Every structure is written in structure tokens, then in C-alpha cells.
Image (cartoon, rainbow, N blue to C red):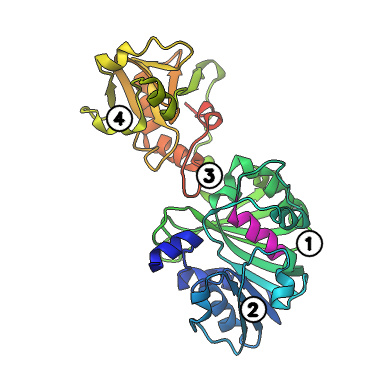
Amino acid sequence: MQAQEKKKRHGQYFTDAAYGSLLVNRFQEDAVSVALELGVGGGALLSAVNGRWPDARCISVDIDPMLSRSPFYQPQDHHHYCADALSPQLEELIGLPSGVADLAVCNPPFIAADWKPNFSTLLSRAGFPVPSKALKVGADILFLAQNLWLLKDKGQLGIIIPSGIISGERNYTIRDALLSQHCITEIIELPDNAFKGTEVKTFILNLEKNKPGTKKIALYRCNKDGCMEHPIWISQEEAKSRMDYSYYKWRSHSKKNVPKQSTPTLTVLRGSVTTSEALKNEWRIFHTTDLKDQTIPGEVNFSEELSSNAKLSNKVIAKAGDILIPRVGRNILSGIRIVKSGLAPISDCLYVLRTDNRPAEKLYRALTSEDGQSWLQAHIHGACAKFITKNDLENFPF
């Protein structure tokens, strides 16, 4: 198997040495006896730990047997194990009882793991909610839970995680559990494309286990040169909602007093025809892939063939004066279009936006303006797959 294929299978995106140093240098520990890294990969994080605490006992785990043969770094007291880092019996496999590690660093795989019954153990003993029915679960949540289990009380964890835990609506309960049980000291938003080969938006989360949290949490943003912007401080309640610097940066710059009587009504409809349904019934619908075929920038003109399919009952039909915006994908910001003519049933990968008391052109200009694009960027969710929610769009400050 080629190296790239194995990397994709394991979800491995190795940490750049600069980000490894950034993560480790933020720790407040003076002395470290035992340091742990699950999913060690190329060793950048544990190598930085060893550079700061050369006498620490370093324990690393990775499921990839090739990494166990690679001397990626040479701590004086290093013990590497080729094992599944998500095994509930990991402490027995590596000889490290739970609650012993002084420090843990981690860059989990960027994958959704197929659900296993053993994952219930990992989640429940970390105080995380266990889904009653699940097909997959984010590896970042599982690695976070396993690290917390092995870390000692008041021990520090520095973990690189995608945006799901930071701002995803589905992970509200995870954030709530973290904030209620541990002290999150800071969140650092890393630059776009921080990891080669993936567009996942990533963050460094630093916390101290089983320690009362502070009233305010510091959010930072790091640029590609490693420089950090001035912190933004948010409350515990705000952090439960989301913890990303870009969102609060946007919010702090966009507070405007809009008279209530001038607030327009915005209706957001999600397309209601799936691709499989359209293929099965031989329906011609408008999909996100059709956006690129439009000849006039920023506009959509539906063909007569599409308009003839607009009589489908109980389906969302776009019409002239509507705004289309992709629900998912990497082209959400650039895919905004105003419908100029025709009718068409819409794919479930698109939203239809309508305003009752403002011209459609004004809504289009608002969405594509610098402020509008900043707002959308701050509200886009997702790690590997980017998406924006209907609820977010309904609150667009138009």
C-alpha cells in the first residue's frame, strides 16, 4: 500500500514543527515527570515536549507499525507502543495507569471512526454524552476522552482539534462537559491550510483536568508566520455556544444599532430533492454543480427544461428574485447567486433565501459584501466537509 493511501486510511496529517512548538510553549508546567502522546505520527509534539523537559519520561502510541520503526526523535527516556490508542485497555497495554500522566499532547486523526461498543466506555468515563444510536463518531472526541482518562488531576492537555468541537452545534454537549469539569485556559485558531493535504480548520485547545474554570477564556488567532493576534476574552456561557476567534472578532466589529422597524423579513428554505430521488424519478433539478455552468457572474437563469419540472408538488421551487447559496462544500462563499429568470426544483444541497420587504439585489449585495462574507465565514461549520445551517442564515444581520 502506498504511503499516501495509508495516511488517508488512518486520517494522519502530521504536525508542523512550528505548531508543535507553539502548542508546547503555551504550557504553564514547570516540571514534567511523565508526558504522553496518543497518535504520535511524525513526533513533532513529543519532540517539542522533550526539548522543553529533557528529563521527562515520554510515552508515545500509534497504530501505524511503520512509525514504530522510525526514530523520529530521541528522548532520553522514550517508550513507544504500536497499539490502538482508542483501546479501553490502553493503560494495561502501555503500563501507564489512568490519572498518572503530568502532560498530554495530541493531534488526533481527522476522521470519523465507525462506531464500536467500546467507545461508550471512553466517552462515559470522560463525562461525555454517549449517543443512543450512532454509526460514526469523530476521532477527535474519542482521543480527547482517552487523553483525559490517562491525565492526572490538574495535569495539562494540549490537543489540536478541528472546528467541530469548537463551534459545531452537535457538539454543544461536549463543550458543556469540558467547561463544567475542566479549566479551559485558551483556544488558539490556527491559519487555514495549517496541515498539508487537508482544508480542515484547526485549533489548539489547552486545558487543565478537573480544575475549576476561570470566568473568562482567552481566544487567540495565529497567522502563518506564527504571530498571535491580541486575545479576545469570552465568558463560560459564550464558550458553550462556540469558541472560535474569527466569530467573536467578526461580532466585535459588526455591532450596529438597526431600528426595529427597518429589519427585513428573511425566509430560508432548504432544497427538498435529493440526488438519488431525482435520478430515480428522472427529474431535472438544479444542483450546486450547475452553478458553474451559468454564463453571467452572480446570476442564475433557469432553462425551459428546468422550468417544466417546476410543477413538482411539495418541493422547494426557486424563482426569479430568490437568492441561492450552497449548503455544503468548499464553495459556499463563492457560490451565492441571484435568480433572474425561470423556475426550478432545488437540490437539498442548496438554500433558497427570500426577503419580503427588501429588493433581492440588496440581499445579494449584503451577502457578497466584505462584511457579509466575513459573517458567513464566521458561521461556516465543519472539518473535512464545510456547511452552514439554516438557523445561522435565518439570523443573517441583513
**Which image quadrant is residue 225 in?**
bottom left
> Mark 2 falls on what kind of element?
strand
**Which image quadrant is residue 86 in?**
bottom right
Q: Position of residue 160 (x, y in %)?
A: 56, 61
Residue for point 73% across, 69% down:
151
Magenta-highlighted residues: 137-148
Residue under pointer 3: 247
Q: Is residue 361 above or below residue 117?
A: above
**Disc 4 residue type?**
Asp
Q: Does 143 appear in magenta?
A: yes
Q: Position of residue 99 (x, y in %)?
A: 78, 70
Residue under pointer 1: 210
Real-space Cα distance between discs 3 and 2?
36 Å
Indicate which disc, 1 or 4, sits on the residue closer to the N terminus.
1
Real-space Cα distance between discs 4 and 3?
30 Å
Residue under pointer 2: 59
Real-space Cα distance between discs 1 and 4?
51 Å
Magenta segment's dominant SS is helix
Real-space Cα distance between discs 1 and 2?
22 Å
Residue under pointer 4: 290
